[in-house]
Image (cartoon, rainbow, N blue to C red):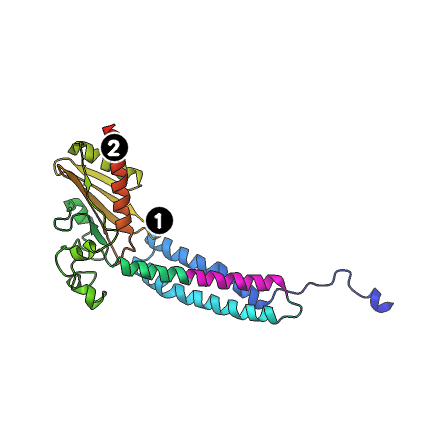
């Protein structure tokens, strides 16, 4: 009777295992790490090399590996615990699945990089559109990629020197772009004139969120700047409106592979411009 009377009315619950607490902490830290790496680069707190190469590409997988290891240990402990507890088991399983998913995304990005080894794409590889003096001045910093010749083997060009395979190093930008399955094509003007083409390109660039849009009616060119959301990477875009067609070019200011961003941008810009020209014609 005395033993029953001395029992606490609310017996203490089993505390959360330390391995589960550590797993939860790492699940919060890892995504925060990637966000800080990206936004720190975007707002100029550190260089893009430190934000992308050091924090994201080098440091990110290490943190993910630590999370995966801790989650695995937590999972084993949760399975062996008597009685088995649902929450620690679920936390460990979710963490492991998240790590595997992120590593899968990283692997897919590696495939994208291999399929898109350059960061300068144009619809006319024999005579690519050129940028204005103002844009070239903005790209003149030592940290930015130069706008390279399309016929020179990329192994001789910055930023590709020593960073591409021997097989790729002997190929020119023109050859690499021509071999792309999703290579963007010029846009025929059809019945529209150059003025209508310039107006359509300007409107399409604006709709895509490009900034610093400027047109040179005499030269028949329209330029704009695309900025990525997370890291704030800038790509320069130019459209050359001729008598019969519009050619496009998109060039990243930094980096080697653009992961297909410039090709996708040109295809989007081309599609929007074509739609606007069609609407104007009606």
69 is higher (above) or lower (below) than 39: below
* Residue 38 percent across, percent down from the top left: 36, 55
| N-term mark: 2 or 1 | 1
Determine if the magenta segment contains residue 89.
yes
Whole-angstrom CA distance, mark 2 to mark 1, is: 31 Å
Q: Please give the range of residues in magenta.
A: 85-102
Q: Is most of the magenta stretch helix, strand or loop?
A: helix
For residue 250, side relative to residue 55 (left or right): left
Query: Which residue is at a point 30% across and 47% down the rendered structure image?
Result: 227
Front position in the image: 84 or 179:
179
Residue underneath mark 1:
229
The residue shown at (58%, 64%) is: 89
Residue 187, magenta (yes or no): no
Mark 1 falls on what kind of element?
loop
Residue at 25% from the left image edge and 56% from the top image edge: 254
**Between residues 209 and 274, which one lies in front from this camera angle?**
274
Mark 2 burial class by Cα count in 10 Å: few <14, some 14-19, many 20+: some
Q: Residue at x 79, y 65 (%)?
A: 7
Q: Position of residue 8 (x, y in %)?
A: 77, 63
Identify the element where label 2 is drawn: helix
Residue 100, can we see it? Answer: yes
Q: Nearer the viewer, mark 2 or mark 1?
A: 2
In the picture of the structure, the residue carrying the numbered disc 2 is 278
Residue 203 position, x and y percent, is 26, 35
Give coordinates of residue 26: x percent, y percent: 49, 63
């Amino acid at each position: 009777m005395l033993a029953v009377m001395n029992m606490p009315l609310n017996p203490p619950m089993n505390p959360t295992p330390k391995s589960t607490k550590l797993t939860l902490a790492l699940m919060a830290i890892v995504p925060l790490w990637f966000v800080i790496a990206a936004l720190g680069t975007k707002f100029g707190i550190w260089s893009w090399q430190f934000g992308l190469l050091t924090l994201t590409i080098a440091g990110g997988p290490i943190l993910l590996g630590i999370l995966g290891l801790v989650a695995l240990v937590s999972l084993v402990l949760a399975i062996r615990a008597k009685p088995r507890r649902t929450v620690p088991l679920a936390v460990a399983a979710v963490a492991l699945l998240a790590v595997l998913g992120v590593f899968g995304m990283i692997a897919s990005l590696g495939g994208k990089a291999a399929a898109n080894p350059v960061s300068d794409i144009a619809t006319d590889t024999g005579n690519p559109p050129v940028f204005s003096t103002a844009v070239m001045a903005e790209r003149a910093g030592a940290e930015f990629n130069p706008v390279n010749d399309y016929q020179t083997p990329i192994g001789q060009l910055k930023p590709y020197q020593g960073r591409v395979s021997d097989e790729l190093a002997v190929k020119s930008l023109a050859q690499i772009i021509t071999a792309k399955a999703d290579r963007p094509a010029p846009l025929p003007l059809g019945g529209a004139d150059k003025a209508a083409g310039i107006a359509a390109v300007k409107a399409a660039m604006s709709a895509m969120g490009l900034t610093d849009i400027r047109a040179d009616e005499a030269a028949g060119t329209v330029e704009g700047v695309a900025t990525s959301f997370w890291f704030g990477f800038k790509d320069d875009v130019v459209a050359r409106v001729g008598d019969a067609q519009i050619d496009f070019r998109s060039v990243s200011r930094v980096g080697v592979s653009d992961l297909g961003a410039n090709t996708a941008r040109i295809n989007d810009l081309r599609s929007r411009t074509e739609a606007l020209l069609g609407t104007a014609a009606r």
